[in-house]
Image (spheres, rainbow, N blue to C red):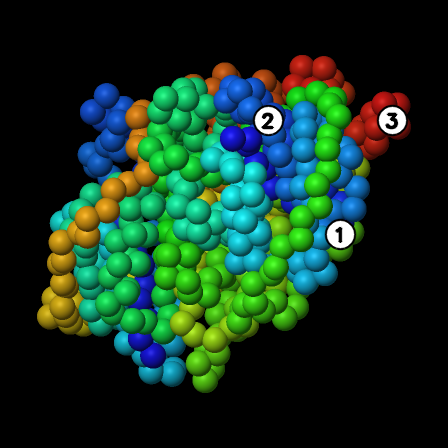
């Protein structure tokens, strides 16, 4: 019974987290003595998945799936899982996948465990480690149902290269009609979203006003990073709500999180704790964020950030 | 319009997280419990619908008697009736099955839950209820308008937002944006007095099992002390990020 993973795409191309999902699913399949099948919806070129151990790729192409619909996508995944006879399904932690996962769980009568941060620590019963209490703790959860949907946390597993020959199967599936329609969709173009970013540059009240955000944006541009902000900053309207990270905002699980002028309230730390490396720049050496950080600079953001930006530009020029 | 708001009874956002019973249970010693913030945005949105368009609001919780204080708070904010399904909330699947079973015999036009609870972060209850009852479902809702039995909803997507529409009944997972933090209501004395008179119905749990079990909780390893870099030595910071942390 192969492991099935649903690989997300954007504009017909596999999203970056797809390769992490493939890597994880492949290692999971090894533990279960089986293979991985990847499902890609409306993706032209799926060949790169063969670099991450995927032996078989099922392609479903249908124009009516160009817009994401949680119920249609859940329906397709359930039909494919039935077709491949899979009991273990692996999904990402993107907003779309978290949206469709419980619908899929209800459809195929599976347990859904999200925020999973590693391979199972036990197979009988199937047990995985997850984050809980908004990253303030972890738990080992065992699953008692036969079918299991794993929601893998972004950037929690990484990539495992494993080049194999993949077989491609094209499946045609009837799409359910739904009364729920997407009327319009806006994506901030040309910017990296917080969910997809390797690096996030985040700033708080220490920036003194929205007019100073060019310093943050310049640094983010140099690093190819997404920009984010603390709750007070979005509450005051300095930055859009979509940039607010923290307990009631967006969760961040990135490789590098740079916090500038953010004191580090417990709710903010909860939201960003899953990030691997945290750098804090703050003029207050007593800011609680320093206790949660890996690297820190005590200094004035208006002095440190532009100089750091210049030095990073030099570094990038030398290392590219 | 009949609205059901699902209320999770969760530790306050500033709570210290500790565990007890051999690290298998959350330690409630000294912890203040509140309405799950994502649910409270939804409850406030429901109040606006009630006041502007006319609606009745029921609130529901799957929990033991300790969650009644949280349900009373929801009544004091303005809900009309509370239902407590009497059981430990074993997992998200169990809670969703209980709510779905209740809804089967008590129909609602609109069910509002939070996108996730801030304790176990399961992010599955509204979606499972929708899946079990074959209802329209949207989560990460940042805006909800109801007009003539039609709903228009904004949903946060990675890197933007989209607008959806559908007919009722509908179930949503709400979050900040449905209303703002400054719109949240602190119950006044009149509300608190009225809440005492409002019905709080306790019903026995339906016979379902959970499909997950928490074997053990852990707290994160204590973090190593931060490495401070002098603000006039930023080359060292880049060196550490490149060679030690390997993130550049």
Badge 2 element:
loop
Q: Disc number at residue A11?
A: 1
Q: Disc number at residue A320?
A: 3
Chain for disc number 2: A
Asked if B3 appears above or below A140 in the picture, the reply is: below
Say which residue appears at 32% left-offset and 71% top-offset.
Answer: B108
Q: Residues within 10 Å of mark 3 (few under 14, many from 20)?
A: few
Q: Nearer the viewer, residue A128 or B174?
A: A128
* Residue A192 placement (x, y as % from top left): 71, 46
Q: Disc number at residue A35?
A: 2
* Residue B61 placement (x, y as % from top left): 24, 55
Badge 3 element:
loop
* Residue mark closest to the camera, 1 vs 2: 2
* Residue B216 placement (x, y as % from top left): 31, 25
Tag 1 and tag 2, C-beta contact below 8 Å: no
**Figure quadrant of residue A298:** top right
């Amino acid at each position: 019974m192969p492991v099935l993973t649903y690989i997300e795409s954007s504009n017909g191309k596999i999203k970056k987290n797809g390769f992490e999902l493939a890597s994880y699913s492949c290692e999971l399949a090894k533990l279960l003595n089986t293979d991985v099948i990847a499902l890609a919806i409306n993706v032209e070129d799926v060949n790169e998945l063969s670099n991450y151990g995927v032996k078989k790729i099922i392609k479903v192409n249908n124009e009516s799936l160009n817009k994401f619909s949680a119920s249609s996508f859940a329906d397709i995944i359930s039909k494919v899982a039935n077709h491949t006879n899979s009991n273990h399904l692996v999904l990402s932690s993107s907003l779309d996948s978290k949206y469709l996962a419980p619908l899929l769980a209800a459809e195929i009568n599976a347990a859904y465990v999200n925020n999973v941060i590693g391979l199972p620590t036990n197979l009988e019963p199937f047990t995985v480690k997850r984050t809980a209490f908004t990253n303030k703790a972890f738990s080992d959860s065992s699953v008692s149902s036969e079918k299991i949907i794993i929601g893998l946390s972004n950037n929690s597993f990484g990539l495992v290269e494993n080049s194999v020959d993949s077989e491609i199967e094209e499946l045609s599936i009837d799409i359910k009609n739904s009364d729920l329609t997407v009327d319009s969709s806006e994506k901030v173009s040309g910017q990296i979203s917080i969910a997809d970013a390797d690096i996030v540059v985040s700033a708080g009240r220490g920036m003194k006003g929205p007019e100073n955000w060019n310093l943050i944006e310049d640094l983010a541009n140099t690093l190819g990073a997404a920009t984010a902000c603390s709750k007070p900053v979005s509450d005051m309207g300095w930055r859009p709500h979509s940039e607010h990270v923290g307990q009631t905002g967006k969760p961040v699980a990135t490789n590098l999180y740079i916090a500038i002028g953010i004191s580090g309230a417990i709710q903010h730390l909860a939201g960003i704790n899953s990030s691997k490396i945290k750098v804090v720049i703050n003029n207050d050496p007593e800011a609680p964020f320093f206790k949660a950080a890996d690297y820190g600079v005590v200094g004035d953001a208006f002095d440190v950030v532009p100089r750091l930006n210049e030095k990073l530009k030099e570094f990038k020029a030398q290392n590219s | 319009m009949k609205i059901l708001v699902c209320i999770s009874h969760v530790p306050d956002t500033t709570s210290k997280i500790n565990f007890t019973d051999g690290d298998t249970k959350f330690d409630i010693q000294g912890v203040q419990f509140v309405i799950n913030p994502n649910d409270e945005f939804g409850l406030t949105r429901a109040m606006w619908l009630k006041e502007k368009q006319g609606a009745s609001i029921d609130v529901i919780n799957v929990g033991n008697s300790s969650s009644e204080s949280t349900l009373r708070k929801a009544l004091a904010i303005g809900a009309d009736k509370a239902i407590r399904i009497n059981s430990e909330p074993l997992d998200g699947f169990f809670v969703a099955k209980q709510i779905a079973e209740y809804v089967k015999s008590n129909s609602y036009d609109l069910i509002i839950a939070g996108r996730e609870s801030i304790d176990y972060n399961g992010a599955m209850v509204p979606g499972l209820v929708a899946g079990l009852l074959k209802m329209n479902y949207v989560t990460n809702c940042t805006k909800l308008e109801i007009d003539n039995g039609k709903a228009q909803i904004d949903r946060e997507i990675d890197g933007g937002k989209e607008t959806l529409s559908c007919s009722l009944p509908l179930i949503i997972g709400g979050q900040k944006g449905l209303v703002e933090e400054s719109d949240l209501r602190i119950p006044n004395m009149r509300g608190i007095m009225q809440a005492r008179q409002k019905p709080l119905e306790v019903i026995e749990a339906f016979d379902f099992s959970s499909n997950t079990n928490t074997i053990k909780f852990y707290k994160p390893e204590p973090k190593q002390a931060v490495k401070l870099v002098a603000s006039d030595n930023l080359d060292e910071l880049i060196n550490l990020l490149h060679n030690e942390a390997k993130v550049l």
